[in-house]
Image (cartoon, rainbow, N blue to C red):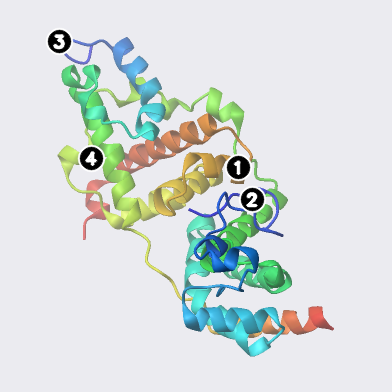
Amino acid sequence: MPQQTSPTSPPDEEPQPAVDVAHAESPDTQEQPVQAPLSSNPVEASALTRAQAGDHRAFAELYSIHKKRIYSLCLRMVGNIAEAEDLTQEAFLQLHRKIATFRGDSAFSTWLHRLAINVVLMQLRKKGLSLISLDEAMEPAVEERPGRSFGEPDLVLSGSIDRLALQRAIDELPAGYRLIFVLHDIEGYEHNEIAVMLDCSIGNSKSQLHKARLKLRSALRTYPQQEGRR
Amino acid sequence: MNNGHDTKQDCAAFQAQLPELIASGVDIADHPHLKNCELCRALLADLESIAQAARELFPIEEPPDELWAQIESKIKKEEG
Protein backbone atom coordinates (compact mmCIF):
# COMPACT_ATOMS: atom_id res chain seq x y z
CA MET A 1 0.00 0.00 0.00
CA PRO A 2 1.09 3.54 -0.61
CA GLN A 3 2.77 5.71 1.97
CA GLN A 4 0.43 7.87 3.98
CA THR A 5 0.40 11.58 3.24
CA SER A 6 -1.67 14.60 4.06
CA PRO A 7 -5.28 14.12 3.08
CA THR A 8 -5.61 17.59 1.69
CA SER A 9 -2.62 17.97 -0.53
CA PRO A 10 -0.65 15.90 -2.97
CA PRO A 11 2.54 14.49 -1.60
CA ASP A 12 5.05 17.35 -1.61
CA GLU A 13 7.59 15.12 -0.03
CA GLU A 14 7.32 11.48 0.71
CA PRO A 15 7.31 10.37 4.32
CA GLN A 16 10.47 8.58 5.27
CA PRO A 17 9.96 4.83 5.47
CA ALA A 18 10.98 3.02 8.65
CA VAL A 19 13.76 1.33 6.71
CA ASP A 20 15.34 2.92 3.69
CA VAL A 21 15.45 -0.19 1.56
CA ALA A 22 17.28 1.46 -1.28
CA HIS A 23 20.19 2.23 0.99
CA ALA A 24 20.05 -0.70 3.36
CA GLU A 25 20.56 -3.49 0.88
CA SER A 26 24.31 -3.26 0.63
CA PRO A 27 26.74 -2.35 3.39
CA ASP A 28 28.84 -0.57 0.78
CA THR A 29 26.08 1.91 0.18
CA GLN A 30 25.40 2.79 3.79
CA GLU A 31 28.23 5.27 4.17
CA GLN A 32 28.26 6.48 0.60
CA PRO A 33 24.79 5.97 -0.83
CA VAL A 34 24.53 5.26 -4.51
CA GLN A 35 21.57 6.73 -6.36
CA ALA A 36 19.13 3.84 -6.79
CA PRO A 37 16.84 3.65 -9.81
CA LEU A 38 13.62 5.54 -9.13
CA SER A 39 11.56 2.70 -10.60
CA SER A 40 11.99 -1.04 -11.02
CA ASN A 41 10.64 -0.65 -14.55
CA PRO A 42 13.66 0.42 -16.64
CA VAL A 43 11.54 2.29 -19.18
CA GLU A 44 9.71 4.15 -16.45
CA ALA A 45 12.91 4.76 -14.48
CA SER A 46 14.58 6.30 -17.50
CA ALA A 47 11.57 8.48 -18.33
CA LEU A 48 11.25 9.51 -14.71
CA THR A 49 14.85 10.59 -14.37
CA ARG A 50 14.68 12.58 -17.57
CA ALA A 51 11.29 14.10 -16.71
CA GLN A 52 12.68 15.23 -13.37
CA ALA A 53 15.37 17.04 -15.32
CA GLY A 54 12.72 18.86 -17.34
CA ASP A 55 12.54 16.66 -20.44
CA HIS A 56 9.05 17.15 -21.90
CA ARG A 57 9.20 14.09 -24.08
CA ALA A 58 10.01 11.98 -21.04
CA PHE A 59 7.02 13.42 -19.23
CA ALA A 60 4.87 12.44 -22.20
CA GLU A 61 6.24 8.91 -21.85
CA LEU A 62 5.20 8.85 -18.20
CA TYR A 63 1.76 10.02 -19.23
CA SER A 64 1.52 7.18 -21.74
CA ILE A 65 2.56 4.63 -19.15
CA HIS A 66 0.15 5.79 -16.44
CA LYS A 67 -2.74 7.51 -18.20
CA LYS A 68 -5.07 4.50 -18.20
CA ARG A 69 -4.64 3.71 -14.53
CA ILE A 70 -5.05 7.30 -13.41
CA TYR A 71 -8.02 7.98 -15.67
CA SER A 72 -9.69 4.76 -14.57
CA LEU A 73 -9.12 5.66 -10.93
CA CYS A 74 -10.67 9.11 -11.42
CA LEU A 75 -13.59 7.61 -13.30
CA ARG A 76 -14.26 5.10 -10.54
CA MET A 77 -14.09 7.76 -7.87
CA VAL A 78 -16.40 10.31 -9.48
CA GLY A 79 -18.41 8.20 -11.94
CA ASN A 80 -18.50 10.91 -14.57
CA ILE A 81 -16.46 10.93 -17.78
CA ALA A 82 -16.08 14.70 -18.14
CA GLU A 83 -15.05 15.10 -14.50
CA ALA A 84 -12.69 12.16 -14.77
CA GLU A 85 -10.99 13.79 -17.74
CA ASP A 86 -10.62 17.07 -15.87
CA LEU A 87 -9.25 15.30 -12.83
CA THR A 88 -6.82 13.25 -14.88
CA GLN A 89 -5.59 16.45 -16.45
CA GLU A 90 -5.17 18.09 -13.05
CA ALA A 91 -3.40 15.03 -11.67
CA PHE A 92 -0.82 15.10 -14.44
CA LEU A 93 -0.40 18.87 -14.10
CA GLN A 94 0.24 18.35 -10.39
CA LEU A 95 2.64 15.59 -11.28
CA HIS A 96 4.50 17.92 -13.59
CA ARG A 97 4.79 20.54 -10.84
CA LYS A 98 5.91 18.08 -8.19
CA ILE A 99 7.84 15.42 -10.07
CA ALA A 100 11.18 16.78 -8.92
CA THR A 101 10.19 16.07 -5.30
CA PHE A 102 9.80 12.33 -5.94
CA ARG A 103 12.73 10.57 -4.30
CA GLY A 104 11.85 6.95 -4.81
CA ASP A 105 10.90 6.10 -1.23
CA SER A 106 7.84 4.32 -2.61
CA ALA A 107 7.01 3.03 -6.06
CA PHE A 108 6.40 5.86 -8.50
CA SER A 109 3.06 4.37 -9.49
CA THR A 110 2.02 4.32 -5.83
CA TRP A 111 3.09 7.91 -5.35
CA LEU A 112 1.24 9.02 -8.48
CA HIS A 113 -1.84 7.02 -7.47
CA ARG A 114 -1.94 8.79 -4.13
CA LEU A 115 -1.37 12.15 -5.78
CA ALA A 116 -4.34 11.50 -8.08
CA ILE A 117 -6.55 10.50 -5.16
CA ASN A 118 -5.63 13.73 -3.40
CA VAL A 119 -6.52 15.69 -6.53
CA VAL A 120 -9.94 14.03 -6.60
CA LEU A 121 -10.50 14.65 -2.90
CA MET A 122 -9.51 18.30 -3.20
CA GLN A 123 -11.87 18.76 -6.11
CA LEU A 124 -14.73 17.15 -4.23
CA ARG A 125 -14.06 19.37 -1.23
CA LYS A 126 -14.06 22.44 -3.48
CA LYS A 127 -17.49 21.39 -4.63
CA GLY A 128 -18.59 21.38 -1.02
CA LEU A 129 -18.86 17.67 -0.58
CA SER A 130 -18.67 16.60 3.01
CA LEU A 131 -16.81 13.38 2.44
CA ILE A 132 -17.67 11.87 5.72
CA SER A 133 -20.76 13.02 7.47
CA LEU A 134 -20.73 12.09 11.11
CA ASP A 135 -24.44 12.78 11.15
CA GLU A 136 -24.91 10.11 8.54
CA ALA A 137 -22.74 7.77 10.54
CA MET A 138 -24.73 8.31 13.70
CA GLU A 139 -28.16 8.38 12.09
CA PRO A 140 -28.42 5.72 9.42
CA ALA A 141 -31.03 6.15 6.75
CA VAL A 142 -34.13 4.04 7.08
CA GLU A 143 -33.12 1.55 4.44
CA GLU A 144 -29.81 0.93 6.22
CA ARG A 145 -31.28 -0.02 9.56
CA PRO A 146 -30.67 -3.64 10.34
CA GLY A 147 -34.32 -4.55 10.79
CA ARG A 148 -35.08 -3.69 7.19
CA SER A 149 -33.27 -6.75 5.97
CA PHE A 150 -35.56 -9.20 7.60
CA GLY A 151 -37.86 -11.18 5.38
CA GLU A 152 -36.42 -9.83 2.14
CA PRO A 153 -34.84 -12.01 -0.49
CA ASP A 154 -31.06 -12.16 -0.50
CA LEU A 155 -28.93 -11.85 -3.56
CA VAL A 156 -26.99 -15.02 -3.06
CA LEU A 157 -30.09 -17.16 -2.99
CA SER A 158 -31.80 -15.36 -5.87
CA GLY A 159 -28.88 -15.50 -8.26
CA SER A 160 -25.51 -13.97 -9.03
CA ILE A 161 -24.98 -10.23 -8.97
CA ASP A 162 -25.45 -8.62 -12.33
CA ARG A 163 -22.53 -6.44 -13.39
CA LEU A 164 -24.61 -3.69 -14.95
CA ALA A 165 -26.95 -3.50 -12.00
CA LEU A 166 -23.99 -3.29 -9.64
CA GLN A 167 -22.33 -0.64 -11.80
CA ARG A 168 -25.52 1.39 -11.70
CA ALA A 169 -25.86 0.95 -7.97
CA ILE A 170 -22.29 2.13 -7.40
CA ASP A 171 -22.85 5.10 -9.71
CA GLU A 172 -25.86 6.06 -7.64
CA LEU A 173 -24.12 5.85 -4.28
CA PRO A 174 -23.78 9.16 -2.45
CA ALA A 175 -20.33 10.57 -3.16
CA GLY A 176 -18.92 9.95 0.31
CA TYR A 177 -20.01 6.34 0.38
CA ARG A 178 -18.77 5.85 -3.14
CA LEU A 179 -15.34 7.20 -2.27
CA ILE A 180 -14.85 4.85 0.64
CA PHE A 181 -16.24 1.90 -1.25
CA VAL A 182 -13.94 2.52 -4.22
CA LEU A 183 -10.89 3.18 -2.06
CA HIS A 184 -11.39 0.09 0.11
CA ASP A 185 -13.16 -2.54 -1.93
CA ILE A 186 -11.78 -1.70 -5.37
CA GLU A 187 -8.47 0.09 -4.87
CA GLY A 188 -7.52 -2.03 -1.88
CA TYR A 189 -6.65 0.66 0.66
CA GLU A 190 -6.89 -0.25 4.34
CA HIS A 191 -9.13 1.61 6.74
CA ASN A 192 -6.20 3.29 8.47
CA GLU A 193 -5.02 4.65 5.12
CA ILE A 194 -8.50 5.83 4.18
CA ALA A 195 -8.88 7.51 7.55
CA VAL A 196 -5.74 9.54 6.87
CA MET A 197 -6.79 10.40 3.33
CA LEU A 198 -10.29 11.47 4.31
CA ASP A 199 -9.35 12.93 7.68
CA CYS A 200 -11.80 10.77 9.59
CA SER A 201 -11.56 8.07 12.23
CA ILE A 202 -10.83 4.46 11.35
CA GLY A 203 -14.14 3.51 12.93
CA ASN A 204 -15.92 6.00 10.75
CA SER A 205 -14.28 4.55 7.66
CA LYS A 206 -15.42 1.06 8.63
CA SER A 207 -18.91 2.27 9.39
CA GLN A 208 -19.23 4.20 6.14
CA LEU A 209 -17.96 1.28 4.09
CA HIS A 210 -20.49 -0.99 5.73
CA LYS A 211 -23.27 1.46 4.96
CA ALA A 212 -22.11 1.76 1.38
CA ARG A 213 -22.33 -2.02 1.01
CA LEU A 214 -25.76 -2.05 2.62
CA LYS A 215 -26.92 0.66 0.24
CA LEU A 216 -25.65 -1.36 -2.70
CA ARG A 217 -27.43 -4.44 -1.42
CA SER A 218 -30.63 -2.50 -0.99
CA ALA A 219 -30.31 -1.00 -4.47
CA LEU A 220 -29.60 -4.35 -6.08
CA ARG A 221 -32.72 -5.80 -4.54
CA THR A 222 -34.76 -2.83 -5.69
CA TYR A 223 -33.85 -3.11 -9.35
CA PRO A 224 -36.13 -5.44 -11.25
CA GLN A 225 -34.30 -8.73 -11.63
CA GLN A 226 -34.95 -8.90 -15.36
CA GLU A 227 -33.40 -5.44 -15.91
CA GLY A 228 -29.98 -6.66 -15.01
CA ARG A 229 -30.07 -9.99 -16.75
CA ARG A 230 -27.95 -10.30 -19.86
CA MET B 1 -38.66 -13.02 15.36
CA ASN B 2 -36.59 -14.04 12.39
CA ASN B 3 -36.34 -17.70 13.29
CA GLY B 4 -36.80 -20.01 16.18
CA HIS B 5 -33.64 -19.05 18.05
CA ASP B 6 -32.62 -15.45 17.71
CA THR B 7 -34.63 -12.28 17.96
CA LYS B 8 -34.52 -9.10 15.96
CA GLN B 9 -32.63 -7.58 18.86
CA ASP B 10 -29.97 -10.28 18.51
CA CYS B 11 -29.73 -9.52 14.80
CA ALA B 12 -29.54 -5.78 15.40
CA ALA B 13 -26.76 -6.29 17.93
CA PHE B 14 -24.88 -8.58 15.56
CA GLN B 15 -25.29 -6.24 12.61
CA ALA B 16 -24.12 -3.30 14.70
CA GLN B 17 -20.87 -5.20 15.21
CA LEU B 18 -20.57 -6.21 11.55
CA PRO B 19 -18.41 -3.31 10.32
CA GLU B 20 -15.81 -4.11 13.00
CA LEU B 21 -16.10 -7.84 12.50
CA ILE B 22 -15.68 -7.64 8.74
CA ALA B 23 -12.81 -5.16 8.97
CA SER B 24 -11.03 -7.28 11.58
CA GLY B 25 -10.55 -10.07 9.08
CA VAL B 26 -11.66 -12.74 11.55
CA ASP B 27 -13.68 -15.65 10.25
CA ILE B 28 -17.18 -14.40 10.99
CA ALA B 29 -18.67 -17.68 9.82
CA ASP B 30 -17.92 -19.05 13.28
CA HIS B 31 -19.81 -16.29 15.05
CA PRO B 32 -22.42 -17.82 17.38
CA HIS B 33 -25.22 -15.64 16.03
CA LEU B 34 -24.70 -16.85 12.48
CA LYS B 35 -25.14 -20.45 13.53
CA ASN B 36 -28.72 -19.65 14.46
CA CYS B 37 -29.66 -16.91 12.02
CA GLU B 38 -30.22 -17.63 8.38
CA LEU B 39 -31.04 -14.01 7.55
CA CYS B 40 -27.79 -12.66 8.93
CA ARG B 41 -25.89 -15.41 7.14
CA ALA B 42 -27.55 -14.29 3.93
CA LEU B 43 -26.76 -10.66 4.68
CA LEU B 44 -23.11 -11.48 5.19
CA ALA B 45 -23.00 -13.58 2.04
CA ASP B 46 -24.57 -10.73 0.08
CA LEU B 47 -22.05 -8.20 1.37
CA GLU B 48 -19.16 -10.49 0.52
CA SER B 49 -20.60 -11.11 -2.94
CA ILE B 50 -21.02 -7.40 -3.57
CA ALA B 51 -17.43 -6.65 -2.57
CA GLN B 52 -16.14 -9.50 -4.72
CA ALA B 53 -18.26 -8.51 -7.73
CA ALA B 54 -17.18 -4.88 -7.42
CA ARG B 55 -13.50 -5.84 -7.51
CA GLU B 56 -14.11 -7.59 -10.81
CA LEU B 57 -16.33 -4.89 -12.20
CA PHE B 58 -14.17 -2.03 -13.31
CA PRO B 59 -12.16 -2.35 -16.49
CA ILE B 60 -9.14 -0.19 -17.18
CA GLU B 61 -10.33 2.69 -19.32
CA GLU B 62 -8.44 4.69 -21.93
CA PRO B 63 -8.70 8.49 -21.71
CA PRO B 64 -9.50 10.36 -24.94
CA ASP B 65 -6.53 11.06 -27.19
CA GLU B 66 -7.02 14.82 -27.03
CA LEU B 67 -6.46 14.86 -23.28
CA TRP B 68 -2.70 14.82 -23.64
CA ALA B 69 -2.80 17.81 -25.99
CA GLN B 70 -4.76 19.72 -23.35
CA ILE B 71 -2.30 18.78 -20.63
CA GLU B 72 0.67 19.66 -22.79
CA SER B 73 -0.85 23.01 -23.64
CA LYS B 74 -1.41 23.84 -19.96
CA ILE B 75 2.11 22.79 -19.06
CA LYS B 76 3.49 25.14 -21.70
CA LYS B 77 1.32 27.96 -20.36
CA GLU B 78 2.49 27.32 -16.81
CA GLU B 79 6.09 27.39 -17.93
CA GLY B 80 5.28 30.65 -19.69
What residue would you read off at disc 3? B4
Q: For mark 4, does the 10 Å Cα neighbourhood hold few (<14), some (14 to 19), or many (20 or more) residues?
A: many
Q: Secondary structure at mark 2?
A: loop
Mark 3 or mark 2, which is nearer to you?
A: 2
> Whole-Å distance between the Cαs marked 3 and 2?
50 Å
Mark 4 or mark 1, which is nearer to you?
A: 1
What residue would you read off at disc 1? A196
- Please determine whether, in this image, residue A34 is positioned above or below residue B9: below
Residue beneath the point at 40% across and 29% down: B19
What residue would you read off at disc 4? A155
- The answer to the question of whether label 4 and label 3 lie on touching residues, with beta carbons closer than 8 A, is no
- Identify the amino acid type marked 2: Thr
Q: For mark 1, does the 10 Å Cα neighbourhood hold few (<14), some (14 to 19), or many (20 or more) residues?
A: some
- The answer to the question of whether label 1 and label 2 lie on touching residues, with beta carbons closer than 8 A, is yes
- Please determine whether, in this image, residue A26 is positioned above or below residue A19: below
What residue would you read off at disc 2? A5
- Identify the amino acid type marked 3: Gly
Residue beneath the point at 35% across and 22% down: B15
Q: Secondary structure at mark 3?
A: loop
Q: Tell me the subunit letter for badge 4.
A: A
- First reached walking from the N terminus: tag 2 or tag 4: 2
- How many dots with numbers? 4
- First reached walking from the N terminus: tag 4 or tag 1: 4
- Identify the amino acid type marked 4: Leu
> Whole-Å distance between the Cαs marked 4 and 1?
33 Å
- First reached walking from the N terminus: tag 1 or tag 2: 2
Point out residue B58 in the picture as x, y percentages from the top left corner. 38, 61
- In this rendered view, identify the residue nearer to me: A112 or A42: A42
Q: Tell me the subunit letter for badge 3.
A: B
